[in-house]
Image: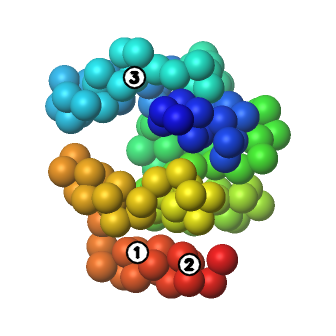
Amino acid sequence: MNAADHCTLLHARVLIPQMVADELKNPKAPADVRAWIANAPDWIEVRPNPTPDRTLQLLDPGEAAALSLAEAVQADGILIDDWAGRTEAERRHLHVTGTLGVLAEAHLAGLVDFDEALSKLRSTNFRLTPDVERLARRRLTQL
């Protein structure tokens, strides 16, 4: 089973605004990330950027676009790691998870090894605090 099959077992499709796709293509993004988005799996659907929401202007443009898209399509949830973005998504009553939450869910489904995936994630520019890692590990034991 490949990574694309893994995601379809967890989520039918993942929508991302063009702005997020562009961030993943940025020359400053890790090479593996740029290669992945250049050949994105079928379950990724890039959508045009939604109309900017002035109430989100203090957020990073990618997070603001993702939140606006999630609301526009009445998404089941939103994957967002940025603390301010997560807080705003929760304020808007969106179901929020982060990268570590997805890894924990995939681990519990027997699709990935959490520690191996975390090790690979650390090799990117992903920022992870010890507190967030502790919360994710606690979640692994509680689910």
User: Could you say which is closer to the camera, residue 69 or residue 55?
Assistant: 69
Where is residue 83 drawn, in percent x and y?
45, 64
Residue furthest front as drawn? 1
Is residue 37 shown left or right of residue 85?
A: left
Where is residue 113 drawn, in percent x and y?
42, 60
Dot 1: few (<14), some (14–19), or many (≥20) neighbours within 10 Å? some
Between tags 1 and 2, which lies in front? Answer: 2
User: Could you say which is closer to the camera, residue 46 or residue 134?
Assistant: 134
Where is residue 90 drawn, in percent x and y?
67, 64
* Residue annotated with mark 2: 139
Amino acid on which the number 1 mark rests in the picture: Val
* Residue annotated with mark 1: 132
Q: Which mark is on residue 37?
A: 3
Amino acid on which the number 3 mark rests in the picture: Ile
Distance of label 1 from label 2 (alpha carbons): 11 Å
Secondary structure under tag 1 reads helix
Is residue 93 shown left or right of residue 143?
A: right
Q: Residue at x 49, y 33 (%)?
A: 2
Where is residue 120 drawn, in percent x and y?
26, 51
Q: Is residue 61 above or below residue 107?
A: above
Q: Please say whether residue 56 is visible from this viewpoint.
A: no
Secondary structure under tag 3 reads helix
Amino acid on which the number 2 mark rests in the picture: Arg
Q: Residue at x 62, y 26 (%)?
A: 43
Q: Residue at x 35, y 55 (%)?
A: 117
Distance of label 2 from label 3 (alpha carbons): 29 Å
Q: Which mark is on residue 86?
A: none
